[in-house]
Amino acid sequence: MMKQCLEEDEFRKKEVDTAQDSLNKANDARKKCDDSLKSAQKDLPELKAALATYEAELLAATTQREKENTSYKQRKADFEEAIAFLKDFIDYVAKTLKGSFTAFSFVEHSEKLLRHATRLHRLSDAVPVLVALATVQAPEVPTTNNVYAYNANQNVADKLKDTLNKLLQRLQADWKDNEDVESKALSAFTELKTKLENTINTLKTNIDRTEKQILAMTKCTQEEDAIIANAGAKLNRNGNLKDSASKMCGQFAKEFVEATKSRTEEIETINQILAIIEKRFGKIPQDIKSYLDSVESGWKAYQNSTGFKGFVEYQQVALAAHTAGSALVAAKSLI
């Protein structure tokens, strides 16, 4: 019986230790999962807010670039149209000034020049040309058909051509500046767009990773909760079984110790009875006395043995363990 008690006690002790170890590890793991979950839940709104900010910045930059590009294309068309007009005008002037021509011949070109200059905000640059046009024509006596003919003053004609060429050069320079500005603006936008897109992609990756972390850590806490519940149940069950076994074995040891001590007391009582009998009725057979003496000595020797002391010690340990176990169960029931 004592062997079974010791084996049961050892087995339940291992089971309790294993359950406690599992419970401790599960609690530690759950804490880590919970900390990671809370951190991810805190980071996710901040990441999404940052993503919205950068996406809005990219949209604003793209919208602005589209406006700039539209303006560039319009300026480019205006410059190229004006440059083409000036080249034609210069050719026309070169041909016309070789002979006489009517005043009306420059009217249409003057109007077109004014329109182009106004559109390009270059009216002040067009004034010298208009002045030259006004002075390049020298009036003559009208013909018989009352048509006023004009002969070009060569110096003034050369000045007109020079003025037109200078205006052409300014417009060509403006056209090149327009191209340079567009190129730089496009380059700057492309660089900004690349940076913003890289940041946006990084944020999206981090958001995806954080959302997966939240799912994983939520699952982790649920799994650890299940492990904690199972380990706690196992700990309670084996603790109760260990306490019950300890109580039962302690009771057995107590009864055995008491029974052993009772045997010695019984023998002493028998010896007392025999002494009374011997005193009253005479001698008692020696073999009975010898037997009782040997039995009494045997019991006393056993009570002094290590084996019997082990029962006494086990009884005390089992009683203390049972008391502690009962207190622990009571405390858990209060929780």
Image: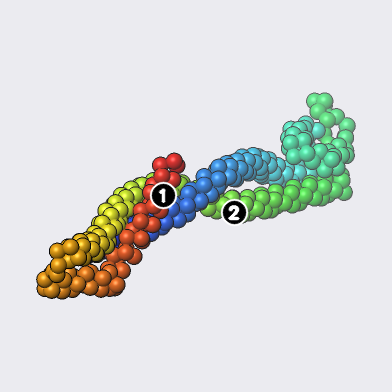
> Residue 329, image x and y in percent?
39, 47
Report the amino acid beneath label 2: Lys
The kind of secondary structure element at disc 1 is helix
Query: Are the residues at dot 2 and dot 1 in contact (C-beta closer than 8 Å)?
Result: no
Q: Is residue 29 above or below residue 334?
A: below
Is 4 left, or right, of 111 in this rendering? left
Residue at image coords 39%, 52%:
323
> Residue 328, image x and y in percent?
41, 49
Which residue in the protein does label 1 denote? 328
**In the rendered view, how is the structure colored?**
rainbow
Is 40 left, or right, of 326 in this rendering? right
Which residue in the protein does label 2 denote? 195
Residue at image coords 14%, 67%:
282
- Residue 92 placement: quadrant: top right
- Residue 311 placement: quadrant: bottom left
Q: Is residue 45 above or below residue 202?
A: above
Residue at image coords 59%, 54%:
195
Report the amino acid beneath label 1: Leu
